[in-house]
Image (spheres, helix red, strand yellow):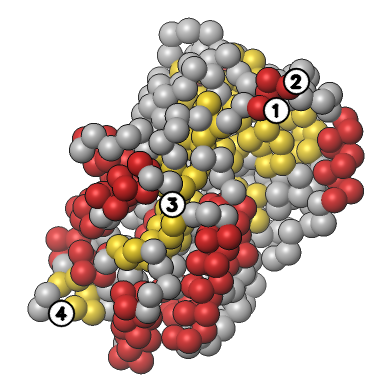
């Protein structure tokens, strides 16, 4: 899953926009919300879980929860994994009522280089102009994009763990009522970042697979461990901290997937290390590398392909590459131990060997022992029953809360205070 060459398209796009004003160029921004994209499998008749929603000539309204306050906002739109141009005819941002409607107040128009519309070539991304719209931490925002008449969804964050909304045909970006938004989707698409003027506190990126993504937590309740950690940090009076979730369900450290995104070792710099204002990362990845080697081959769409055999040394080398990338960017990086997954003996031995290195290998700047937080003391290869969502792999809401409690807040406080 290689990203298209960006040089010529980026130059063409830059030439199409007016130069940023000096004040805008000097503005320091801090990511307050983010999501990571993955390619949509390009199939004529995909399985239902991978069917693209109809978006051409419609308005897609997505609800996000920022992790910081800000006097204004900036949005990033992405066509990173697209093979065709992304055409956005109009974009707005407004307070959300938590569903398809807007709360009291007028939607703010989002512009790009002074223009209401935007066309992004394949592989390109763009930040909006600063938007005169106050952002309040943890208050829902609705970002509405009216799309071109031939637009399709080529990339998404497939498991948003919440409902987003698609309108009837036409431009409904400023519509306050939910009546025009009868379509439903459980994906995020095109918007990958909301930033606010820098607060000085910095941000923390949680990057990994479905256990960071929050899979099997209560739908719509915002109980992934990064969200629980953000609430815990606020309750314990840390400096304002955006906990940015860059998890992708099914993601692997070492292998790309036709369904589950670019390998984390390849996407780390883009999805975590270069986010504005980030100071630290928590990495939790590897269980799918261990498991997918043993899953059966599937005819048609095989999301687990390639079924690559991995070793502890291979995974450790992958961790070392990510650690080096983080340190090159001046970031501290914590290693999360791989959580119990009721694995057969050979795979369990591999998980234990990897965890031994994460704890004692000295590569990470710190360790978050998620394994110790979740395992059943009587059966350490398994999740504690109260922390098991039911599939033996993914935590319940209580399990995700236990993961958040395992993060060393004192160490984070030190990093934020002394970058």
- Separation of disc 4 and disc 2 at Cα? 61 Å
- The answer to whether residue 304 of the structure is visible from this angle is no
Tag 1–tag 4 contact (CB < 8 Å): no
Point out residue 2 in the picture as x, y percentages from the top left corner: 73, 64
* Side of 163 relative to 306 (left or right): left
Give the farthest residue toward the left.
378
Tag 4–tag 2 contact (CB < 8 Å): no
- Separation of disc 3 and disc 4 at Cα? 33 Å
Give the farthest residue toward the front.
418
Identify the residue shown where x is 68% and y is 42%: 78
Question: SS for tag 3?
Answer: strand
Q: Which one is closest to the eye, mark 1 or mark 4?
A: 1
- Separation of disc 1 and disc 4 at Cα? 55 Å
* Residue occupied by mark 3: 280
* Residue occupied by mark 2: 21
Which mark is drawn over residue 25? 1
Identify the residue shown where x is 12% and y is 75%: 377
Question: SS for tag 1?
Answer: helix
Question: SS for tag 4?
Answer: strand
Q: Mark 2 packing: few (<14 Cα in 10 Å), some, or many (20+)?
A: few
The first of marks 3 and 4 along the sequence is 3
Point out residue 94 in the picture as x, y percentages from the top left corner: 51, 18
Which mark is drawn over residue 379? 4
Instruction: Indicate whether 320 appears above or below 400.
Output: below
* Side of 332 relative to 368 (left or right): right
The first of marks 4 and 2 along the sequence is 2
């Amino acid at each position: 899953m290689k990203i298209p060459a960006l040089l010529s398209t980026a130059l063409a796009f830059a030439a199409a926009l007016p130069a940023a004003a000096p004040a805008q160029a000097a503005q320091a921004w801090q990511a307050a919300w983010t999501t990571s994209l993955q390619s949509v499998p390009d199939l004529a008749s995909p399985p239902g879980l991978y069917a693209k929603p109809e978006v051409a000539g419609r308005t897609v309204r997505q609800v996000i929860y920022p992790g910081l306050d800000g006097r204004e906002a900036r949005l990033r739109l992405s066509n990173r994994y697209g093979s065709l141009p992304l055409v956005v005819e109009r974009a707005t941002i407004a307070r959300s009522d938590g569903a398809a409607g807007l709360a009291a107040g007028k939607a703010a128009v989002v512009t790009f280089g002074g223009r209401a519309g935007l066309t992004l070539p394949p592989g390109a991304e763009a930040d909006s102009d600063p938007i005169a719209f106050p952002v309040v931490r943890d208050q829902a925002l609705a970002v509405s994009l009216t799309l071109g008449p031939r637009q399709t969804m080529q990339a998404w964050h497939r498991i948003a763990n919440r409902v987003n909304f698609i309108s009837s045909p036409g431009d409904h970006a400023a519509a306050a009522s939910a009546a025009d938004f009868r379509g439903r989707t459980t994906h995020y698409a095109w918007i990958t970042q909301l930033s606010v003027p820098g607060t000085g506190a910095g941000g923390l990126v949680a990057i990994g697979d479905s256990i960071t993504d929050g899979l099997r937590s209560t739908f719509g309740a915002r109980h992934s461990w990064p969200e629980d950690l953000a609430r815990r940090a606020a309750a314990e009076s840390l400096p304002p901290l955006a906990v940015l979730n860059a998890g992708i369900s099914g993601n692997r450290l070492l292998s790309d997937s036709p369904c589950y995104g670019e390998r984390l070792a390849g996407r780390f710099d883009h999805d975590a290390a270069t986010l504005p204002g980030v100071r630290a990362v928590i990495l939790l990845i590897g269980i799918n590398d261990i498991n997918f080697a043993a899953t059966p081959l599937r005819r048609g769409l095989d999301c687990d392909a390639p079924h690559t055999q991995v070793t502890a040394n291979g995974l450790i080398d992958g961790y070392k590459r990510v650690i080096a990338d983080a340190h090159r960017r001046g970031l501290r990086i914590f290693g999360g131990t791989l959580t119990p997954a009721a694995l057969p003996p050979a795979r369990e031995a591999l998980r234990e060997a990897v965890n031994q290195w994460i704890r004692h290998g000295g590569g990470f700047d710190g360790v978050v022992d998620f394994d110790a937080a979740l395992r059943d003391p009587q059966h350490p290869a398994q999740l504690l029953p109260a922390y098991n969502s039911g599939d033996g792999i993914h935590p319940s809401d209580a399990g995700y809360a236990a993961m958040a409690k395992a993060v060393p807040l004192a160490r984070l406080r030190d990093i934020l205070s002394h970058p």
